[in-house]
Image (tube, rainbow, N blue to C red):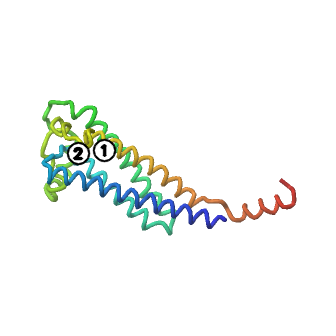
Amino acid sequence: MPFAATVGASKGLRALGLFWIVLCAASLGIALVAQHAMGMQPCPWCVVQRLLMLASMGCMLLVLGSLRVPIALVLPLLANFVFQVAGIAAAGYQFLVASRSDRCDLGLADRILIASGLEQAWPWMFAASTSCTEAASATLLGFPFSLLALGFFILGLGLALAMAWFAWRSVFGPDPALHTISSAATRQGLR
């Protein structure tokens, strides 16, 4: 049965990884349609969150490519966990602080985008063209995008923890030798 537990853990990882990739792609697609088709321009924190979603998708692709070597799952799963926490911090800051601030100085999100060069390389995806205060008025189903992003990253954190559990089971599933000894002891009434 230990092999079955490992295979089950791999299937769980694969299912969660694919689900997360589809969810990230759908979220980014909605953001790009809102920007380019509906005229809802992103603020710097919106763009940082897009970057974190793309990084998380990249981690999941690495996880899916590493399923046959369970120890190789550690780094992409850890990085994904960090990206989810960073996403929660970015969306939370945008919702609670930046969207209520009238200041227009160069903030952390602006500095990240400038330093990365992504705003110049792919402006259709990473150009921040409005303030967080103005972006706060953009809603989807009655909820501000920043609040939806916060929920998205909280869900991502839950999935990251579930995937870590599946990876743990994949690496440290039941030991075949212990399972055999335990079964023999039970049959002999030694337990």
Q: Residue at 67%, 62% (x, y): give it.
A: 175
CB atoms of marks 2 and 1 within 8 Å: yes
Q: Residue at 12%, 48% (x, y): give it.
A: 39
**Farthest-out residue, right:** 189
Whole-percent x and y of residue 102?
A: 15, 30
- Tag 2, which secondary structure? helix
Dot placed on the residue nearer the N-terminal end, 2 or 1: 2
Q: Residues within 10 Å of mark 2 (few under 14, many from 20)?
A: many
**Quarter assignment of residue 117:** bottom left
Q: Residue at 23%, 51% (x, y): give it.
A: 31
Q: Is residue 165 left or right of residue 147?
A: right
Q: Residues within 10 Å of mark 1 (few under 14, many from 20)?
A: many
Q: Residue at 15%, 39% (x, y): give it.
A: 131
Q: Is residue 84 left or right of residue 127?
A: right
Residue kind at label 2, given as amino acid type: Cys
Marks 2 and 1, how far apart at CA: 9 Å
Whole-percent x and y of residue 44?
A: 19, 44
Residue 107 sits above or below residue 169 on the image: above
Whole-percent x and y of residue 128?
A: 15, 47
Q: Quadrant where the N terminus lies? A: bottom right
Residue kind at label 1, given as amino acid type: Ala
Say which mark, if any, is on residue 123.
none
Say which mark, if any, is on residue 46.
2
> Which residue is labeled 1 in the image?
149
- Tag 1, which secondary structure? helix
Residue 114 sits above or below residue 92 on the image: below
Mark nearest the camera among 2 and 1 is 1
Front in this rendered view, residue 132 or 76? 132
